[in-house]
Image: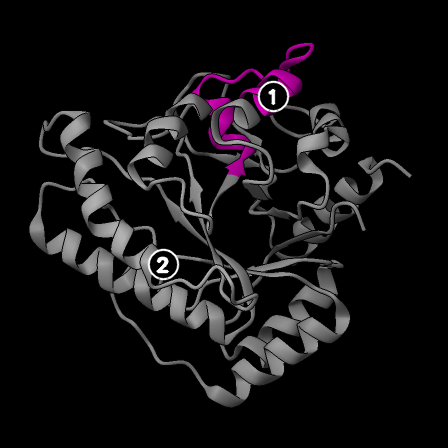
């Protein structure tokens, strides 16, 4: 399948017990999960039986799995405690990601807080993230990729426009297990006008020019409640926002997205998610 389509699924109650029925209900061909509270620093161990069942059933059904690391992670922070907790949290997500069979672990690229220069924050990213990447074994097919997700450009964001990925990748030595998760709402909010004629092609061409082929590993397919360049991270259902449905069809046809799964993070609960998954499947080239 050129582009499996799925969503971020609810797993409260158990990865297998709750997550798998939810994935089936929305017609997911790919899934993304949290393995910790996304708005906290806790690092739960998980339930081995649930991990094993989830991993085995997803593998048997050919459903690629992704983990989203907690939102609080910020390696550009001027607060030492935040940085230390970010290291612990991301390491936890990578370890748990491997345990549940994840192909990638998504982490937001963070911001330079405390008024510090961007270069100083990126040097800190290198200092603290490079050792985590060194713990990944590129030769081990079960090792998840670390997927950088540019933000919508709020505050002193280190990476929002795709061109910002260049210095970020350089800071991390273009590690062979380093990839990109492109959030369409974030890209639109940051200033990439995907709704304009040729906008999707320009965005994806620039992404490939910046980080190279094969680095785009996942797409968060979300429409935007706000206009292009608003720097607001407010997701909308597919076709109901300012991006519109057609650009998602263009995205699905671009060479850079060949084999790349799409997962939605849209409003509406189970019914809304099922509708968005179906809409994206309908936009795929037969």
Which residue is outermost to the front?
Answer: 139
Residue named by callout 2: 38
Q: Secondary structure at mark 2?
A: loop
Q: Is residue 39 visible?
A: no
Say above or below: 133 vs 100.
Answer: above
Q: Position of residue 4 (x, y in %)?
A: 73, 51
The rendered magenta stretch, by its main secondary structure, is classed as helix
Decide whether residue 32 is among the magenta residues: no
Q: Position of residue 207 (x, y in %)?
A: 53, 26
Front tag of 2 and 1: 1
Residue at point 13% right, 31% down?
A: 120
Cα–Cα span, label 2 and label 1: 32 Å
Q: Secondary structure at mark 1?
A: helix
Say above or below: 213 vs 17.
Answer: above
Q: 69 left or right of 245?
A: left
177 and 111: which is toward the camera: 177
Residue at point 72% right, 46% down?
A: 259
61 and 153: which is toward the camera: 61
Residue named by callout 1: 205
């Amino acid at each position: 399948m050129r582009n499996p389509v799925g969503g971020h699924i609810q797993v409260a109650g158990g990865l297998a017990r709750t997550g798998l029925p939810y994935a089936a209900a929305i017609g997911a061909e790919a899934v993304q999960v949290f393995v910790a509270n996304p708005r906290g620093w806790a690092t739960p161990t998980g339930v081995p039986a649930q991990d094993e069942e989830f991993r085995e059933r997803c593998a048997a059904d050919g459903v690629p799995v992704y983990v989203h690391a907690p939102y609080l992670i910020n390696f550009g922070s001027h607060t030492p405690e935040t940085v230390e907790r970010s290291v612990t949290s991301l390491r936890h997500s990578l370890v748990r990601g491997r345990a549940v069979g994840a192909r990638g672990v998504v982490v937001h690229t963070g911001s330079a807080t405390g008024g510090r220069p961007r270069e100083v924050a990126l040097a800190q990213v290198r200092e603290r993230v490079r050792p985590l990447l060194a713990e990944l074994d590129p030769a081990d097919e079960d090792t998840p990729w670390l997927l950088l997700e540019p933000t919508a450009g709020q505050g002193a964001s280190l990476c929002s426009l795709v061109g910002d990925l260049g210095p970020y990748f350089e800071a991390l030595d273009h590690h062979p297990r380093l990839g990109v998760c492109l959030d369409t709402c974030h890209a639109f909010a940051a200033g990439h006008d995907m709704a304009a004629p040729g906008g999707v092609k320009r965005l994806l061409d620039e992404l490939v020019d910046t980080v190279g082929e094969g680095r785009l590993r996942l797409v968060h397919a979300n429409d935007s409640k706000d206009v292009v360049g608003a720097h607001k991270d407010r997701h909308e259902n597919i076709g109901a926002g300012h991006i519109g449905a057609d650009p998602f069809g263009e995205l699905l046809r671009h060479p850079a997205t060949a084999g790349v799964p799409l997962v939605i993070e849209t409003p509406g609960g189970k019914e809304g998610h099922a509708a968005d998954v179906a809409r994206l499947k309908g936009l795929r080239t037969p």
